[in-house]
Image (cartoon, rainbow, N blue to C red):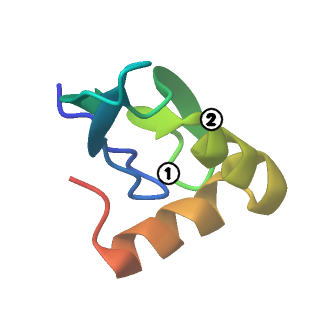
Amino acid sequence: MSKICQITGKKAMGGCNVSHSKRHTKRTFDVNLFRRKFYWVEQDAWIELNVSAAGLRTINKIGLDAALKQAAEKGYLY
């Protein structure tokens, strides 16, 4: 499962752990992802999405249909 939100397009970022002695080692900052099922009223179907916490808030704010249309325009759905 890739670590990409299908609504917002958020991905895992790279960075460094910095110790007290300022030694840098590579690490990743993962996205807060969930695998959730949504009922899509317009299509009368259940769909399953990889959604971040920000993506869940977007769906709650503008609705599932509008969020899916936005994500499809930006190319985030796969």
> Is residue 29 in sight in this rendering?
no
1 and 2 marks in contact (CB < 8 Å): no
* Apparent side of residue 4 relative to residue 32 in the rendered image (left or right): left
On the image, numbered disc 2 is attached to which residue?
53
Could you say which quadrant of the image residue 53 lies in? top right
Residue at image position (38%, 49%) is 6
Residue at image position (70%, 54%) is 58
On the image, numbered disc 1 is attached to which residue?
43
Q: Nearer the viewer, residue 23 or 25?
A: 23
Identity of the residue furthest to the front in this view = 21
Residue at image position (39%, 33%) is 50
The amino acid marked with disc number 1 is: Gln
Could you say which quadrant of the image residue 49 lies in? top left
The secondary structure type at the circle numbered 2 is helix
**Residue 29 drawn at (x, y percent):** 37, 34
**Residue 10 drawn at (x, y percent):** 41, 52
> Is residue 39 in sight in this rendering?
yes
Could you say which quadrant of the image residue 35 lies in? top left
* Apparent side of residue 76 relative to residue 56 in the rendered image (left or right): left
The secondary structure type at the circle numbered 1 is loop
**Residue 44 drawn at (x, y percent):** 54, 42
The amino acid marked with disc number 2 is: Ala
Residue at image position (73%, 56%) is 63
